[in-house]
Amino acid sequence: MIITSLDNPKIKYLSSLSKAKERKQEQKFIVEGKHLVDEAKKQNVLIEAYSIEEKEGYIQVTPSIMKKIANTNTLVSEIGLCKMLDKKELSNKLLLLDGVQDPGNMGALMRSAKAFGFDTIILGEGCVDIYNDKVIRSSQGAIFKLNFITSNIKDFISSHKEYKIYGTNVVNGIPMEDVMNEGHLGIVLGNEGNGISKETSSVIEKNIYIPMEDTESLNVSVAGGILMYYLR
């Protein structure tokens, strides 16, 4: 079977999932490229796979249709239709994101979170959609191995007193070397331009920072990676 028409119902449906509203409504999303399709298959979230080549278990499409479905400028050989990830139990270490908006930063933070044992990410208001194609590509498959909870960060902290939650603030924080690696802890990272919101800051008891020389701040994904590595 090969699909050659852009008017095919399957192709129209896949194209519609480029919009966040449609993804949320359908509880489905697209991954692009062999690596991500394989990862989706391993995690049992792959519904259908499409390829420009004739392959067993794939629906074949023409290159022009693949360009229509995919969001990358270069032609990808295959894509996958996936169901959204199920929520799991909270892990011992949490990464709380308060308005992280850049897809590249979000994907990079996912990779670091998985690498260093922060297996649950709390997504606060204003965060970029994790099923955005740029986020998924930047995550390099880490998205399939993490637990995501969408919540108001202030409310989450207030209702989970069993976790020691640290904000990130150079002005009134303590050096990361002074933080004890406790059993249940979380790190809050804020928006790229504005940092952690006042609302969230009001319930954070302690802040930490990364000692630096002649530098005022780091990119949020770099800072998050360093802190998660240190507290792993």
Image (cartoon, rainbow, N blue to C red):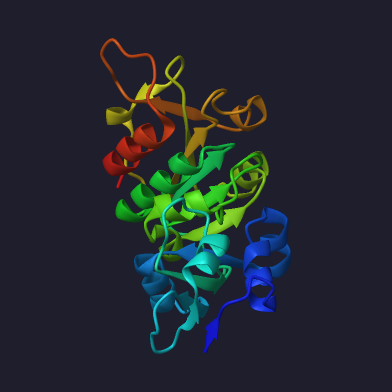
What count of labels does the image hold?
0
Task: Identify the residue at image location x=49%, y=73%.
Answer: 62
> In the drawing, does residue 49 fall left or right of residue 128?
left
- Does 19 sit above or below residue 48? above
- Does 53 sit above or below residue 25? below
How far across and down, in percent of the image, does residue 96 sit? 52, 43
| Residue 118 in view | no
How far across and down, in percent of the image, does residue 102 sit? 51, 38
| Residue 133 in view | yes
- Does 60 sit above or below residue 108? below
How far across and down, in percent of the image, does residue 148 sit? 54, 58
Of the pair 10 and 5, the residue shown nearer to us: 5
Name the image quarter holding residue 101.
Answer: top right
> In the drawing, does residue 216 fall left or right of residue 154?
left
Task: Identify the residue at image location x=36%, y=46%.
Answer: 182
Name the image quarter holding residue 146.
Answer: bottom left
Of the pair 194 and 198, the residue shown nearer to us: 194
How far across and down, in percent of the image, does residue 179 sit? 33, 33
Task: Identify the residue at image location x=46%, y=17%.
Answer: 172
Task: Identify the residue at image location x=28%, y=43%.
Answer: 229
